[in-house]
Amino acid sequence: MNIAVVVRQVPDLIESLDIDSTASALDWESISFIVNECDDHALEQALLLKEANGGTVSVVAFDFGDVENTLYTAAAKGAERLVKIPCETHRHPSPWTAASWYAQVIRDLAADLVLVGVQAHDEFDGVLAPALATALSMPYLGVIRGVQAGSRPTTVAACKEFPRAVRARMEIELPAVLGILGADRPPRYVPVSRIRNAMNTVHFEEPGLNVPLGESPVSVCRLYPPVSGTHAEMIAGSEAEAADRIADILVEKGLLS
Amino acid sequence: MITTSTNTGEELLERLSRAESGESPWGCMQCGLCAASCPLGDAMQLRPRDLILQLLAGNVDRVLQSPSLWMCVGCYTCSLRCPRGIELTDGLWPALRDSSMQAGFQPPAELQETFQNLFKYGNTLGKSPRQRLAWAKDLNVPVRDLSKDPCRVDVLWLVGCYPSYYPRNQLVTRAWARILTKLGVSWGVLGAAEKSVGECERLFGEEGLFETLVEENRKLFDQHEFAQLLTLDPHAYRALQAFYPRYGAWYPVQHYTMFLAERMPQLQSLIVRPVEATVTYHDNCCVGRRCASYDAPRLLLQLIPGIKLVEMQRHHEDALCCGGGGGGMWLDGHIVAHGGHRLSDDRVLQADATGADVLAVSCPYELSRFEDAAKVAGLEQRLKVRDIIELLAESMELGEGSVA
């Protein structure tokens, strides 16, 4: 099974997010990046599938942020092919533009299965996973928590999660795109020595593309920083006094009568 | 991915023989002193001697996937008591942990997060490097950030992760800045450029991470002119003194207790008021048991008028570990889940038994560990935990509040 995984860089929320002088965009210069959590799960799921059933794992990413460390880490974990798409804008294009570029690369990889995080916290005008399925003309299943081999070599079985934690096991014909919420197990830790080794031995594939940002049908009028509401109440006094105050609060909020 | 280790037990022991300065683990005579001395030995399925025995028996995977492998808190008791001089703490445990991870076994999840924080942000707490100097906000002495204002200083102070970010430790950090300034020392810090020294990660077998930190720190230190490094962290002191030189990175370094002990007359002249308290001192494992520096902290405490120094039943070389070393700071959950307990809970009871008002410490990990333990034991009203720096700052009228 040829598995392609899309791995995105998203703003790292350990830093404060500043709004630029236009008031309609983030100040991208002040942002540091981190791998998108759902994409990290998608990579783990791909590696688990490969280890259980054979095949190859290819990782595709736009070239900005901390992408090289992300790709070296993927290689250290067991990914075979690492594709870095040149990107002058140093940030992720809109999902619709990104999908068309990812699709070009993934077609060349002849992937049977495409795994991508079901969401990223910097998406605001659509989500990549279904857009990518559309661009590849493949069927799509989203909000997936776990993937195993299917009953036939041309299928995989995916566990889809619905509200109230209802789960459905579905079998889908390949090729297909799956939007991953979580892998069968948490992303693995790989020792730094292996990442360092990958830095010295692994080569990236860099297709001759250069991605324009593209026009999005959606434009941002204005971004607003979060506004502090009422702050937490620090409850002082003895344990009994604190318990009384907590009980009063629960009554005030209508949770106790 | 779990892969069967390709190393045999004998190969692992051979690797250990070559890697460490102590006697070869081949010399282990199974006397059991290490197991009996280990403060968490009762909870370990495989104690130090068992690890060696299992390796000799060829049960490599049993060793590499044992939860016991992640229960050592780096107290050095087994290493110091081993009659054959086998370097267990610095040698056996890190090598086996490294082998475990290389074989595909996963370290405890809380430790993975710490490792990832260090690799990505250069600090154990997963905080923004840009906030490294948050502790200095509104401080009433100048803090020279050498990353922005490079100049020659006598002392390059490596502030450390907990002292930089953890609110309780920041009080100590601020007091130390005032003391250094009062002493007239020319000092600077690295600000946002500072990274963890990485000692706990070395002990936890993440050799690649430790090497990365050594390389980055070496490059950083070499950009600056200074006479010596200074740290509040005994673990950082140990790493810089003993392990950085192995990578060709040699720098004069002192733990702050050693630095102050060399300036006793000057320090004494700056003390202006007594601190009325009965104080017991907890010897940390790195500067104490491992480096045998026991006098400096006690001399500093005795310098303060009003302090009556009393010893716990276990002190000096026999002191009980706080349980935070070697990465134990992040592994309380793992240790308790596998039948162990927090050593800091025992230690505050030992401190309380002396009748002391104050448990004095000289390691950034110990403040939060002992304060938590005192709360668990219901002792927080009668046993205060204070860094020696705080007691000195109080007696020099440089503190931010009363100590008792």
Image (spheres, coloured by chain):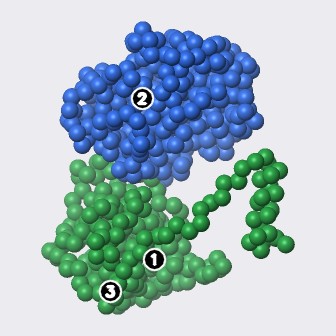
Q: Which chain is blue?
A: B
In the image, what residue occupies the spot 40% across and 31% down?
A: B177
Task: Residue A168: give x, y in percent of width and height.
Answer: 60, 82
The number of callouts visible is: 3
Q: Chain of mark 1?
A: A
Q: Earlier in the sequence, mark 3 or mark 1?
A: 1
Q: Which residue is mark 1?
A: A118
Give the Cα distance between marks 2 and 3: 52 Å
- Give the camera-side residue of B1 and B256: B256
Image quadrant where one finds the C terminus of chain B: top right
In the image, what residue occupies the spot 40% across and 61% down?
A: A16
Indicate whether B372 appears above or below A212: above
Q: Quadrant of residue B44?
A: top right
Q: Of the residues shown, which amino acid type is indicated by label 3?
A: Ser
Q: Residues within 10 Å of mark 2 (few under 14, many from 20)?
A: many
Q: Residues within 10 Å of mark 1 (few under 14, many from 20)?
A: many
Q: Which residue is mark 2?
A: B178
Please name which of the two marks, 1 or 2, marks the residue nearer to the observer. 2
Task: Residue B124: give x, y in percent of width and height.
Answer: 45, 44
Indicate whether B321 appears above or below A66: above
